[in-house]
Amino acid sequence: MYGLMIKGGVIMWPLLACSVVALAIIFERLVFWLLVLKNKNQALINRIFTLTEEGEFDTAIQEAEGTQCLVCRILSSGLAHRNYGLAQSLEAAALHEIEKMKHRLSVLDTIITAAPLLGILGTVSGIIVSFDLLGDAGIEDPKAVTGGIAQALITTATGLSIAIVTLLPYNALTRKVEKVTRHIEQLVTCYEVTVQKGMEKCG
């Protein structure tokens, strides 16, 4: 591995940094989604809907207090701030949670773009070195240029590999965010109707 880094030249170090950052973010996002799945509490979600429909708003907020369930936090936060506008409060709470879901995905997107470009930069650098050596050594000694060619090939392959390996989990994570976002939007719409029913009972 170290030998490959040396052969690839100085561009290999930022490529290594990209791969380490990408792996760290992917691992952190996987842990995040595992916790979201683990903390999902469908029984509590149903309980909040039931209490809200009955007009017991304060009880619904208390039931959700301290919960780690993503959906429950959105519903209870929107309900607690309903006096400032129910739809706006629910939307603000949902956007806050969606931003958490998107956290650091932009960094992965940047790495997917930057890694191949760094590889191309390494390729150009390697070719420049090869031409310099070729000019010094002449055509009679083609072995003198192999170091530059190797640098060009290694950095290109490394940059593309990092981009491809990062692209797969990035797309999976992006689809997951989109799927959960649609689910939240549907629940929020239903919850607005439920709150209105609860207000009619209270009134």
Image (cartoon, rainbow, N blue to C red):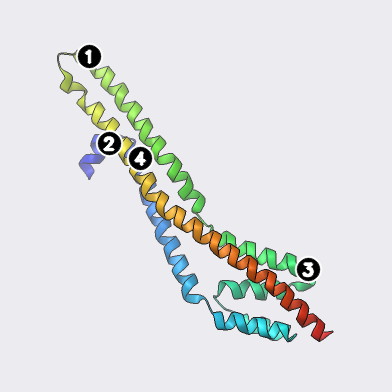
Q: Earlier in the sequence, mark 3 or mark 2?
A: 3
Earlier sequence position, callout 3 versus callout 1: 3
Q: Position of residue 14 (x, y in %)?
A: 37, 41
Helix, strand, or loop for circle 3?
loop
Are the two marked residues, 1 and 4, in contact with CB atoms closer than 8 angstroms? no
Task: Name the amino acid, label 1.
Answer: Asp
What amino acid type is highlighted by mark number 3? Gly
The three-letter amino acid code for the residue at tag 2 is Ile
Percent coordinates x, y for residue 196 in the rendering: 77, 77
Taking the spot 16% from the left edge, 22% from the top edge, the residue there is 143
Q: Which residue is mark 4?
A: 159
Q: Is residue 172 left or right of residue 153?
A: right
In the rendered view, does 8 fall on the left or right side of 72?
A: left
Q: Quadrant of residue 5?
A: top left
Q: Nearer the viewer, mark 1 or mark 4?
A: 4
Q: Are marks 2 and 4 in contact (CB under 8 Å)?
A: no
User: For mark 2, what is the residue?
Assistant: 154
Q: If you read the primary sequence from the N terminus, does the residue marked by circle 4 or circle 3 appear first?
A: 3
For the residues labelled 2 and 4, the Cα–Cα distance comes to: 9 Å
Label 1 SS: helix
Q: Which image quadrant for residue 87?
A: bottom right
Which residue type does callout 4 highlight? Gly
- Dot label at residue 85: 3
In the rendered structure, which disc, 1 or 4, sits on the residue that comes first in sequence? Answer: 1
**Picture residue at 15% right of the left edge, 13% below the top:** 140
Query: Is any atom of residue 65 visible in this view?
Result: no
Provide the secondary structure element on which disc 2 rests.
Answer: helix
- Look at mark 1 in the image and give the residue it sits on: 136
Disc 4 is placed on an element classified as: helix
